[in-house]
Image: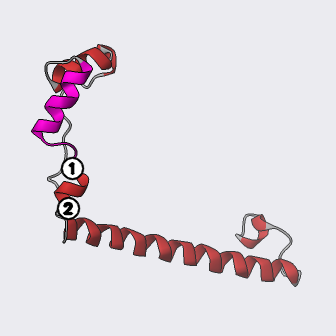
Amino acid sequence: MSVPFSARHIGPDATETSAMLKVLGAASLDDFIAKAVPAKLRAKRALALEPALSEAEALAKIKHIASVHINIVLLLVNKYRILEEQLKYGNVKDLKEFYGFN
């Protein structure tokens, strides 16, 4: 049986929230925040957030970000290997020379 994404990742429902607030002695989430977070630390206006993504959209975005990062890592690893080789054979003496900052 598959559990929906929202059930796995989107906090408590109204009944659970009410029970939690009762234990905390707060009438509402706003009341709880007012008691728990000093006014000077609270945001003055609502956050300007993009609309939520579906699970499939979020996974696609994560995969894209990961693919970009892996390419950057591979580029850096390759550059490091070239530097090691150049240092080993005495073609350059240090990192500054390798990058042309003499």
Question: What type is the residue that disc 2 sits on?
Answer: Phe
Point 19% across, 72% down: residue: 1
Task: Kindly give the residue lying farthest to the left in the view shown.
Answer: 14
Q: Is 9 in the magenta? A: no
| Helix, strand or loop at mark 2 | helix
**Colour pattern:** secondary structure
Q: Which residue was labeled with disc 1?
A: 10
Residue 5 image label: 2
Tell whether label 2 touches label 1 (CB within 8 Å): yes
Q: On screen, 94 above or below 23?
A: below
Question: What type is the residue that disc 1 sits on?
Answer: Ile
Label 1 packing within 10 angstroms: few (<14), some (14-19), many (20+): few
Q: On screen, 71 above or below 31?
A: below
Q: In the picture, which quadrant includes the C terminus? A: bottom right
Where is residue 43 drawn, in percent x and y? 25, 26
Q: Residue 38: which quarter of the image?
A: top left
Q: On screen, 35 above or below 7?
A: above
Q: Residue 87: which quarter of the image?
A: bottom right
Which is more toward the observer, 31 or 18?
A: 18
Span colored in magenta: 10-24
